[in-house]
């Protein structure tokens, strides 16, 4: 019952704990990948960046379900796009400023701080100026902004293999792969709640869905990495991404069956469901 | 990064661009899911998708013009027209579906007479709905909104490109600024709006203030980034 055990662990995570896992997991993961890559002079550890992004995505998906549970009136995708919009600005700002200051390795920290502060301000604007009056808006937007930034940074690292600003510009932005991870990140953060919302929405099902979509994103970064870093680094990401997607897809399907009133075959597919 | 008078001009340009995006969103007839089922007036998708669509088209058009000339007015005009065409063709093809596939008469539930054509609206609003399709007033309003979005997109992209000289970076950064402003504005209209004749349009000063604060913060970050050359 490994699946059941993991589900049990995911089912009752409170937002504070999840935020801590998300921040620590993504920052440590990105730095671990960068250090291993540069210390051993290789690119095979780039996949750790894509794994680190999953922690950030989990935090973001949970923030989406907390904020959107209040009903924001514009659909779930809007808040996901906001997260990614704030995230991309934070990433570019953080990496660029860190490079300009001469401490390239500080990039993720500056990114995180800027994203957190900016997200908080957007939350304050939403509550005070637009008059949303959602009590967790500031906190939720701060989480979302940080999640979007760290996810984009993790995937950018997975594609470029270094944290250098010039390399990320050359490998991720100039090639256009940024568009893929932008939308993949949007899917991983906003889609889970959009797909699972309703009175029977459960945290574990939503979060398992987000890990599953992160697996698909990892397949995409793997394909991009084959072209930027070579076959070994790219293929490793592709295989791990596929394995993640497959495992969590099965888990997700199990959870859907658990929560659904009934699962019936349509008659078109082989009758594998009972 | 040298801080001089140009920097202030760049910041102001980004601020105005962000405000144009934020106000432009209020002009676009956004119907959301109800409009997709022809139960509300407007285009059947969310604000952010429409704003992002018109803004990105404007960005592309502006970027293309920028590769031939560096005249600010031509670039802005190209961005506005590009986004206007995008929004116009979206509404036109959407109208074909509402007219010929769904078979709904276009009617606005927010006004009794179309301010432009003067046609009476209430007899054509189906019971239980808040209008259908894209009436003339909404179409005109949408065109204005799309052009404002494109103008805003071009207005953001132009100074960014002058700051860092990297087209890809400027475009992504502009998309980020664009999305933040579009989402804040769409939160202000709470989902659906018909255009400038809609009573909800009067809420625009809130979005103006919110977008101004957000755009200033984004502009300050934008002038600090470098092209990484």
Image (cartoon, coloured by chain):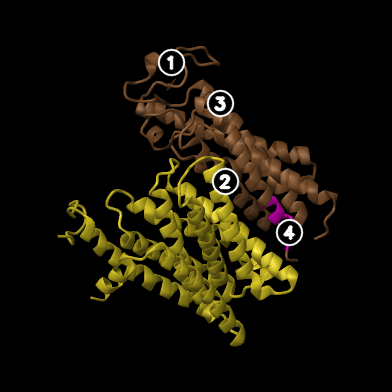
Chain colours: A yellow, B brown
In the rendered image, residue A269, in percent from the top left (x then y), is placed at 21, 56
Instruction: Decide if residue B19 is in sight here.
Output: yes
In this rendering, the answer to whether A17 lies above or below A81 is below
Quarter of the image holding residue A259? bottom left
* Quadrant, the N terminus of chain B: bottom right
Q: Nearer the viewer, mark 3 or mark 2?
A: 2
Quarter of the image holding residue A210? bottom left
Q: Is residue B150 within the magenta segment?
A: no
In the rendered image, residue A267, in percent from the top left (x then y), is placed at 17, 52
Task: Say the numbered circle drawn on residue B196.
Answer: 3
Q: Are marks 3 and 1 on the same chain?
A: yes
The chain letter under disc 4 is B
Task: Say the numbered circle drawn on residue B224.
Answer: 4
Instruction: Name the N-terminal-most of marks 3 and 1.
Output: 1
Binning the other alpha carbons within 10 Å of mark 1 as few (below 14), some (14 to 19) or many (20 upward) gives: some
The chain letter under disc 2 is A
Whole-Å distance between the Cαs marked 1 and 4? 52 Å
Instruction: Name the N-terminal-most of marks 1 and 4.
Output: 1
Instruction: Name the N-terminal-most of marks 4 and 3.
Output: 3
Tell whether label 2 touches label 4 (CB within 8 Å): no
Q: Nearer the viewer, mark 2 or mark 1?
A: 2
Which type of secondary structure does the marked residue at label 1 adopt? loop
Task: Say the numbered circle drawn on residue A125.
Answer: 2
Q: Are marks 1 and 4 on the same chain?
A: yes
In the rendered image, residue B197, in percent from the top left (x then y), is placed at 53, 23
Left/right of residue B167 with respect to residue B198 in the rendered view: right
Q: Which residue is mark 1?
A: B121
């Amino acid at each position: 019952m490994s699946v059941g055990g993991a589900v049990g662990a995911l089912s009752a995570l409170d937002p504070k704990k999840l935020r801590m896992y998300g921040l620590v997991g993504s920052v440590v993961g990105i730095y671990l990948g960068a250090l291993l890559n540069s210390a051993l002079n290789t690119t095979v550890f780039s996949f750790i960046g894509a794994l680190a992004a999953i922690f950030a995505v989990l935090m973001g998906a949970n923030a989406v379900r907390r904020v959107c549970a209040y009903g924001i009136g514009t659909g779930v995708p809007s808040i996901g796009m906001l997260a990614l919009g704030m995230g991309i600005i934070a990433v570019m700002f953080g990496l660029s400023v860190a490079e300009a200051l001469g401490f390239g390795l500080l990039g993720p920290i500056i990114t995180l701080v800027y994203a957190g502060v900016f997200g908080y301000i957007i939350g304050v604007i939403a509550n005070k100026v637009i008059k949303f009056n959602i009590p967790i808006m500031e906190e939720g937007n701060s989480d979302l902004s940080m999640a979007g930034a760290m996810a984009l940074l993790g995937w950018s690292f997975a594609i470029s293999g270094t944290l250098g600003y010039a390399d990320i510009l050359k490998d991720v932005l100039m090639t256009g792969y940024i568009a893929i991870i932008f939308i993949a990140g949007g899917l991983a953060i906003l889609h889970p709640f959009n797909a699972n919302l309703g009175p029977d929405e459960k945290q574990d099902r939503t979060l398992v869905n987000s890990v599953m979509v992160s697996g698909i994103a990892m397949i995409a970064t793997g394909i991009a990495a084959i072209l930027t870093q070579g076959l070994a680094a790219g293929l490793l990401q592709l295989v791990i991404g596929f394995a993640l997607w497959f495992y969590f897809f099965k888990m997700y399907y199990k959870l859907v069956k658990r929560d659904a009133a009934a699962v019936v075959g349509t008659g078109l597919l082989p009758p594998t469901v009972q | 990064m040298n801080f001089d008078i140009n920097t202030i001009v760049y910041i102001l340009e980004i601020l105005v661009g962000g405000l144009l995006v934020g106000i432009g969103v209020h002009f676009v007839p956004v119907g959301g899911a109800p409009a997709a089922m022809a139960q509300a007036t407007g285009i059947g998708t969310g604000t952010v998708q429409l704003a992002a669509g018109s803004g990105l088209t404007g960005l592309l058009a502006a970027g293309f013009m920028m590769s031939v000339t560096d005249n600010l007015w031509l670039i802005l005009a190209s961005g506005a027209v590009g986004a206007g065409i995008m929004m116009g063709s979206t509404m036109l093809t959407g109208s074909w579906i509402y007219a010929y596939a769904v078979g709904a008469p276009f009617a606005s539930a927010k006004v009794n007479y179309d301010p432009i054509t003067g046609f009476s609206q209430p007899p054509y609003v189906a019971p239980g709905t808040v209008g259908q399709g894209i009436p003339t007033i909404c179409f005109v309003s949408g065109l204005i909104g799309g052009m404002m979005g494109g103008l805003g997109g071009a207005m953001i992209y132009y100074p960014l490109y002058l700051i860092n000289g990297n087209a890809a970076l400027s475009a992504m950064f502009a998309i980020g600024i664009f999305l933040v402003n579009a989402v804040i504005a769409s939160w202000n209209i709470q989902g659906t709006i018909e255009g400038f004749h809609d009573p909800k349009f009067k809420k625009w000063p809130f979005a103006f203030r919110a977008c101004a604060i957000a755009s200033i913060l984004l502009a300050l970050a934008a002038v600090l980034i470098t092209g990484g050359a």
